Image: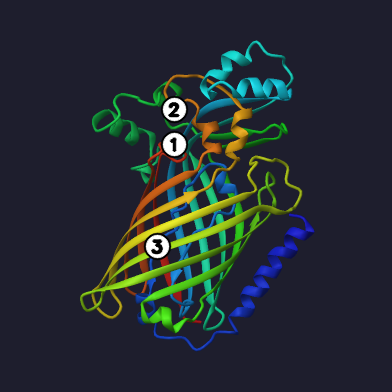
Amino acid sequence: MNFLHKKVIRCIILFTGFTLHLQAQVPDSAYTNMLRIHKPNMVAAHPLGLLLYRINHRFNSEPVSNTTVQIDLGSANIWLPEVRGYLPQDPQAVDHLSSFPWHQRDSVFQGMPRNYDSMVFRADGVIKTIQLQAHFRISRKLELSVGMRNFLLTGGSDPTTLLTGDGFIESFHEHVAGGTDPFARKQYGLNQAEIYYQGPDGTPVHFQKGNFVVAGITTDLIYYPDFNLFKQHCIYLQTGMHLGLNTTAYNRGIDAGISVGVFKQYPVGKANTLSVAVAVSLMRQHLFDLNATADFIEGKNLPTTEWLFSYRKTLNRYRFWELGLDFYYLGPYNPLSSFDQITPVGNRLSSHWHMALTHLYRSSQNWSVFFAFGKKWTWMVYINEDFKVNNAPDIQTGLALEIPLKL
């Protein structure tokens, strides 16, 4: 860890500690818990996206009443057979290839001059995500969040991967939907684990089974405007500034972004509520470069949109449960306009042979169902699926725990 790296982390820690002395007068926690949506971190565990800061939007009416710690554990199955991409350097060759559908370019490319760059990407395994985040109330309208992103690459054969292991997924395909080995997963071998990407610059990004990765540190400053007219109609706004320090040698640098969110609550009966929420954000990747060794995404601006619907049942002053449906859109890691320059080549054992590469030029659209139960602590679970069937991830589940602290 270099000097600049240490200095950034030290500033974050000092700033976090300073906020503990700025605790404003706080409202009753049971009251503020009613004016928010309790949701886990459901951002999809893409094998390259995990190395970047992608925003997990929160929908609150105001800062937390007490300092709060949230722990998120996720399990995501990844299945991306190896695909190579060739990028000719001759403009005439690029124009000629782009006139063909992408899935027919490989046969045309074989007879062209060999002046090209190349890229390769493959990924397999069950990724365990471990995310920690602490939320601090700075004032009546400001909240600071500091977090850490980590993940572990496994083969997926342990009991904790009951729903996300290769065996369960293939059994589901065979007996429920999809048929026998629809993606040729068995032909490559089950319970494998590896992530490998090499871009045109020639520097590989490589993780193997058992690798534990500290992917980054996050800092979010959220502002809650106080508009009485909106509050009268149970509408709550928030804006955010976000910084992410990526800590792997591959992409060491700082991401920065902004977000805007709004949610409205509809009373249902005496104490129950139906909530509708939407948020948009834009993250600038590698606003500051700290000697990163690899360049694995071309698109530097990552937009996100999130839509959420939830129903909350209040059982008594402190106990409740909440059921929600969430849609999360993430822009492509590489610009779609660059796809015409790529000639994908791979082993065509199934219709999804190309997903490792083509998914980098397509948006991600993830749907999640989540459930929360709260008393003094709040437990949350979710299941996530991308109905584009990109297999990055194929299916993802998670468990989260939110613990309020009285300091």
Q: Are marks 2 and 1 in contact (CB under 8 Å)?
A: yes
Residue visible at 38% across and 55% down?
A: 326
User: Residue 12, position in %: x, y?
Assistant: 66, 68
User: Residue 369, position in %: x, y?
Assistant: 33, 53
Image-based side of 376 in relation to 102, left or right: left
User: Residue 343, position in %: x, y?
Assistant: 60, 24
* Mark 2 closeness class: few <14, some 14–19, many ≥20 residues within 10 Å: some
Image-based side of 373 in relation to 225, left or right: left
Q: Is residue 240 above or below residue 358?
A: below
Of marks 3 and 1, which one's residue comes earlier in the chain?
3
- Disc 3: which residue: 39
The amino acid marked with disc number 3 is Lys
Give the residue furthest to the right: 3
- Disc 2: which residue: 352
The amino acid marked with disc number 2 is His
Q: Quadrant of residue 337?
A: top right
Image-based side of 184 in relation to 290, left or right: left
Residue visible at 53% across and 18% down?
A: 104
Distance of mark 2 from mark 1, alpha carbons? 9 Å
